[in-house]
Every structure is written in C-alpha cells, then in structure tokens.
Image (spheres, rainbow, N blue to C red):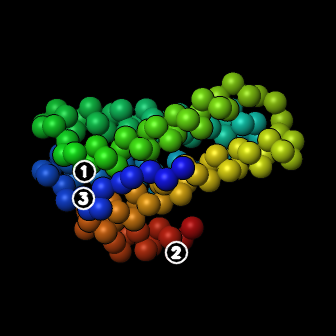
Amino acid sequence: MFWLLPDTWTPSDDAELVAGWRLWLELSDRAWPTAAWDGTPAGAVEQLREFLDACDEIERDCRESAEPSPEFAGLVQPLTVSASAVISLWWDDHAPLDADRARALHEDLQRFGALAERVLSLLAAHGGWTRLDAVRRHSA
C-alpha cells in the first residue's frame, strides 16, 4: 500500500519541532522487534503498540501549545493507520511462527518499515537534522 505523505514539512513552532524530534526518535527503533522478542507475532507487534502510545503522547503534547500543522498530521496519521493495521492482524497470535506466517509477518512489518523510512527521511531533510539521519543509517 502506498501512503500519500506531504512533500515537505517545516516545523510551525517550537512545539512541533520537538514533536518532530520525538517522532524521529520513536520511529528510529520501533519498526522491528528487539532482541528480546519472544518469537511470536504478538511479541513482534508489541513495538508497534508502544509506538502508537508514543504517537498519542507526541500529538497530545504538541496540541498543548497549538494545533499541529496539516503537514505534521500528514506524517503521523499514515504511520498510525499502518501500525494499527499490522497490530490488528497479529496482536493476539501467540503461537510460534511457521515459515508461511513468518513470511506474512515480515511482509507486514516491512510495509510499515518502508513507510517509517520515508517519514524518517522527510523529517530529517526538512527538520534540519539530515546528518543525524545519515549517522542512524550508517550505524544500522
């Protein structure tokens, strides 16, 4: 699925700049399971559940000072919809993976990961921290 993202994003105020930083940091390590993953699909999507909680907090904190710009909302909304779709498929699957389910889970996580990479690049390019994005990619 292809998500329509804004072409650019310029923080509208300091609160949105902080929100962009927080979103960048959350996305940098939430697309894939950690080394503590238990090997189940439900365990794999736990990172995405935590990401959704972080998005709620980021948006709430950003709204305390002003309404986020449409561009910022256009970055967050596709991420939350995509993460929610993956979670809804796997949240209650606690069985060990077989080859077919592993492939399907990987494809679902990969779709979210591809969207996350696009948002990370856009945040880095237009939020003023492109060098940090280059460091993140080099260390991955």
95 to 68, vertically: above or below: above
What's under tag 2, amino acid-wise? His
Q: Residue at x 12, y 50 (%)?
A: 13
For disc 2, the neighbor class at 10 Å (few under 14, some 14 to 19, many from 20) is few
Instruction: Look at mark 1 in the image and give the residue it sits on.
Output: 71
Is the C terminus in the top left, top right, bottom left or bottom right quadrant?
A: bottom right
Q: Nearer the viewer, residue 34 or 69?
A: 69
In the displayed structure image, the side of residue 54 where residue 88 appears, left or right: right
Residue 87 on image: x %, y %: 59, 33
Q: Which residue is mark 3?
A: 9
Picture coordinates of residue 94, whole percent (x, y): 76, 28
Residue type marked 3: Trp
Left or right? Give the position of 123 relative to 89.
left
Please state the horizontal and vertical placement of residue 64, each as a whole percent of the image.
Answer: 16, 32
Q: Residue furthest top?
A: 92
User: Which of disc 2 and disc 3 is earlier in sequence?
Assistant: 3
Q: Which label is found at residue 138? A: 2
**Outermost residue to the right:** 98
Secondary structure at badge 1 equals helix
- For the residues bearing labels 3 and 2, Cβ distance under 8 angstroms: no
* Closer to viewer: mark 3 or mark 2: 3
